Image (spheres, grey):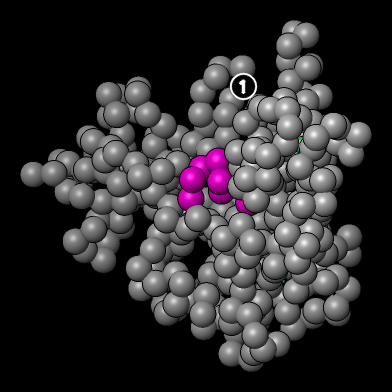
Amino acid sequence: MKIPAHIYEAHKQEFLCKIDSKDKTVSAYATGTVLKSNQLVTGDKVLLEQNGDEYQITDLIDRTNEIFRMNIRERKKRVTAANCELVVIATSVSRPPYKQGVIDRFATRSFQWDVPAVVVFNKMDEFQNDFDIDFEMRRFENIGIECFEVSATYPENPVRFGRGSFKDLRKRLINTQSIILGQSGVGKSRLITSLSDREINLRSSEIGKSGKGSHSTTWSEVIDCGTFRIIDSPGIRSFSLDDISPKELINYFPDLHAISLTCRFNNCRHESSTKGCAFYSGETDSQKADIIKSRLSSYMKIMEEISKTSAWQKSR
Ligand SMILES: Nc1nc2c(ncn2[C@@H]2O[C@H](COP(=O)(O)OP(=O)(O)OP(=O)(O)O)[C@@H](O)[C@H]2O)c(=O)[nH]1
Ligand SMILES: [Mg+2]
Ligand SMILES: [Zn+2]
């Protein structure tokens, strides 16, 4: 008899699995045939077989989606998690400081993965108005990304009125499996601890003098919060999107993509000197002109970076 389970933690050959029908996690090994064709990851649904005290993973259930980056050399996907219905992009508004470019990169990935995203502005208890948070939220809401303003340390205190609160965020997560992503130290683990209905206490550590996190979470793991599951992940060090080709990048900027379709030339580079470029024709919806301008500048920055890498790869 095969036992349906979820992978909560994936190591090289050993997998911590939660048996769906019981409140029980077991350590399981994967047999050659399953491992050969797949790399098993956190969030995977699998079937187990029990032999005495040992559990073996015999089958991998088809994934609904994958959190991945491409390995350019091998032209293969490197998957880090699976079956996520939502990407929770977490940022701090104090220390480490808010960086728009970083959130844009995560948003770009969520479009590439085809998984809806939300942005959580955490540490609102320390917010000093040093950037225009309403503008930032408008920017993300314009691409269908819901925003929340919370404090993981003081979850019950509404910090400002208007946008999504801690309660709203919890509501949004109910009955889903999601993954939380963000730089080290933004409060991902602390957020999960506060969001959970259960008595969990994930390891968090103080922000150093440099204002940077100290990479306290070291691998991805599913955290069962009672009414929802969320994958805690280690703070990402590198925000490089260099595995995305310059041609496909615009597809992951849906707001810009729609406008770019009306540029006169379909190989338009969207620079201010380009003839017939829709971004400089003054026809963009004036209420949104400021956010589009800011998104275009972010797109251009990423484009410049990935164009360099692909030229470098071509020359090899
Ligand atoms: N003031 C304040 N501090 C917070 C808040 N959320 C988290 N912190 C603190 O920020 C520090 C880092 O939090 P973590 O939860 O470890 O951050 P993380 O994103 O999980 O970091 P990594 O695991 O390294 O990727 C800890 O000292 C937390 O107590 C918040 O809402 N307000
Ligand atoms: Mg952590
Ligand atoms: Zn153009």
Q: Amino acid at mark 1?
A: Ile
- Give the residue at the far bottom of this rendering: 157
Give the answer, above or below, for where 250 lies relative to 233: above
Instruction: Tell me if 71 is positioned left or right of 173 in this view.
Output: right
The residue wearing badge 1 is 72
Of the pair 313 and 196, the residue shown nearer to us: 313
Query: What range is drawn magenta here?
Result: 107-115
Instruction: Tell me if 19 is positioned left or right of 109 in this view.
Output: left
Q: Is residue 222 visible?
A: no
| Quadrant, the N terminus | top left
| Quadrant, the C terminus | top right
Image location of residue 211, percent across then percent down: 85, 63
Instruction: Tell me if 76 is positioned left or right of 304 in this view.
Output: left
Give the answer, above or below, for where 113 lies relative to 283: above
Q: Is residue 242 visible?
A: yes
Image location of residue 71, percent across then percent down: 59, 25
Helix, strand or loop at disc 1?
loop
- Give the residue at the far left of this rendering: 1
